Image (tube, grey):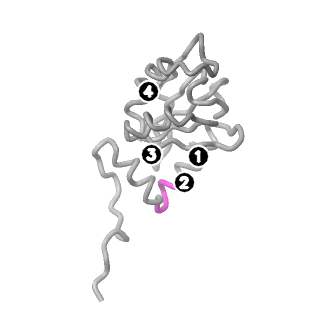
Amino acid sequence: MKIAFATQDKVRVDAHFGWAKSLVVYDVTPQGHRFVESFEFGDKLEEDGDEDKLAPKLDAIKDCAIVYVAAIGGSGAARVVALKIHPIKVPQPEPILDILDKLQQVLNGTPPPWLRKAMAKDGERQFDFEEDEVPHV
């Protein structure tokens, strides 16, 4: 499953989605994670109501299941969700590798329903969740 991170320094989630200098993408599985790609964005990143700056970012993450951000505006969030990407706000800057490690641990356990849905984005069901079945009494 591909995960994107909005970042200014490519090390931490520390950027507003619309103002991020970079979006880095990793592939994460229960077995580990690997860097996939980094997308760089220049000029006019500050808050200015310019919705056109979102288009290249949305295109960069279109095949991701989740995007981690420090913040995201209402319009950006709506457009991300419309692409079936789950935005997650990080309350304070957090190292990307720490998030990847935590996510990998969750994938090795029983992922919450929202994460199962995000994992199914690519059409593949990688896990068999027995607890999805309703027991007959």
Which x, y percent locates residue 14? 67, 32
Cβ atoms at labels 3 and 1 below 8 Å apart? no
Residue 29: which disc? 3
Spatial CA distance of label 2 from label 3 is 9 Å
Query: At x 56% / y 33%, what residue is drawn?
Result: 5
Residue 105: which disc? 2
Q: Is residue 84 magenta?
A: no
Looking at the image, residue 45 sits to the left or right of residue 82; the answer is right
Residue 101: which disc? 1
**Secondary element type, mark 4:** helix
User: Which numbered mark, 2 or 4, is in the foreground of this view?
Assistant: 4
The amino acid pointed to by label 1 is Asp
Instruction: Give neighbour class at mark 4: few <14, some 14-19, many 20+ (Cα, 10 Å).
Output: some
Query: At x 53% / y 37%, what residue is drawn?
Result: 74
Which of 126 and 91 lies nearest the eye of the viewer? 91
Looking at the image, residue 126 sits to the left or right of residue 50; the answer is left
The amino acid pointed to by label 4 is Leu
Q: Which residues are magenta?
A: 106-110
Q: Earlier in the sequence, mark 2 or mark 3?
A: 3
**Secondary element type, mark 3:** strand
**Secondary element type, mark 1:** helix
Residue 58: which disc? 4
Taking the view exactly as shown, the residue that stands out farthest to the top is 43
Cβ atoms at labels 2 and 3 below 8 Å apart? no
Instruction: Give neighbour class at mark 3: few <14, some 14-19, many 20+ (Cα, 10 Å).
Output: some
Looking at the image, residue 78 sits to the left or right of residue 69; the answer is left
The amino acid pointed to by label 3 is Thr
Residue 34: which disc? none
